[in-house]
Image: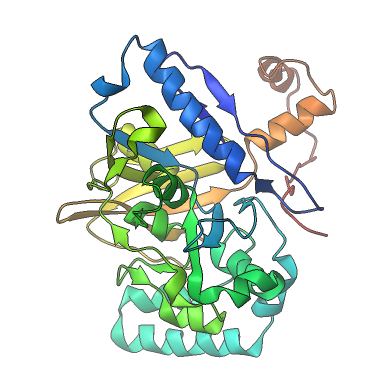
Amino acid sequence: CVLYDRSTWCSLQPSLYPRPGWVELDPEVLWSQFVGVVKEAVQAAGLHMRQVAALGISTQRSTFITWHKRTGKPFHNFISWQDVRSAELVNSWNRSLLLKVIHVIFTVLHFFTGNDRYLAPSFLTFSTQQTSMKLSWVFKNIPEVTAKKNNCCFGTVDTWLLYRLTKGSVFATDYSNASSTGVFEPFTKCWNPTLCNLLSIPMSIYPPVKDTSFNFGSADSEIFGVPIPIMALVADQQSAMFGECCFQPGDVKLTMGTGGFWNVNTGGNLCASHRGLYPLIGWKIGEEVVYLTEGSMSNIGTTIKWAQDINLFTNVDETAKMARSIVDSQGVCFVPGFQVKL
């Protein structure tokens, strides 16, 4: 997680690796660095906090945390979207008879209705990237969460920051972040009760979902010295789509960061696919809902960093020259599988 100000000053949020395949973030470190980088950005711009009209928060998706509703105390660290601790659970579900039955039921429903709402479930395959499976793992393996499930809150990074900024008075997320969890139904625009029942996850833990552009309340004056309105929450890939002005149906962007994310604007049409593409809500502003279709891979930047760490090159700029130095790879292929748990 990297936070930038206008001067491109950044604060690196170190990941934690407590066990093989586990990737976590310390919520207190994330919070203190978030507050610090906002203050640094305002100071570097030569402004005062009272001159800040509003906050808009864009965060990485699918990284989540759970905490006690009354005390605000986290039950565990943030579990990153890169974490693969749920691999055994994922494999068990993907081999299960129940999932095969679900495929048949929704295939029949799609055949007779032609409704794309039934297409995605007919090809449903669980993966370690999905928040749903890691959240199911949490309820199965962290007894305190299960014991306090009636007082448990679930939130992605945006929800946690909003909760902390408002001193616990606002518990919410937006449509872009919710739809990226795999627990939110983009067709009905609701948290998916069927999936939650299957995975034994209580519906009460989820935050209300608001428009991407919405008055989420104000940051408490104790944090920045003055109350600052929070007027937008948006997931990072949807934010990148908006920032690249991909406003028209058919507009496409490709982001290559830690992972690679290809998105196409499908306008007001929510398009399901059996080819591995996933329908998302890009943003909701007023009555307008813009949908996206996404394809992704987990390792772009991580692959480059790994190659640098094992001394294949010193500077990333060298890689272009290395690639041009040979005609072809003579059949050698490299498949990045850093998120695969063996």
**Residue 18, placed above or below residue 326:** below
Question: Residue at 26% of width from left, 22% of height from top?
Answer: 50
> Could you tell whether 241 is left or right of 249 in the image?
right
Question: Residue at 33% of width from left, 34% of height from top?
Answer: 221
Report the residue that reaches farthest toward the left: 287
The image quadrant that residue 98 belongs to is: bottom right
Question: Residue at 57% of width from left, 79% of height from top?
Answer: 199
The image quadrant that residue 59 belongs to is: top left
Across and down, in percent, residue 105 comes to 46, 90
Across and down, in percent, residue 247 comes to 24, 41
**Residue 333, placed above or below residue 293:** above
Number of numbered markers: 0
Front-most of residues 71 and 219: 71
Across and down, in percent, residue 122 comes to 48, 79
| Quarter occupied by the C terminus | bottom right
The image quadrant that residue 289 belongs to is: bottom left
| Quarter occupied by the N terminus | top right
Front-most of residues 330 and 280: 280
> Could you tell whether 274 is left or right of 319 in the image?
left
Front-most of residues 291 and 60: 60
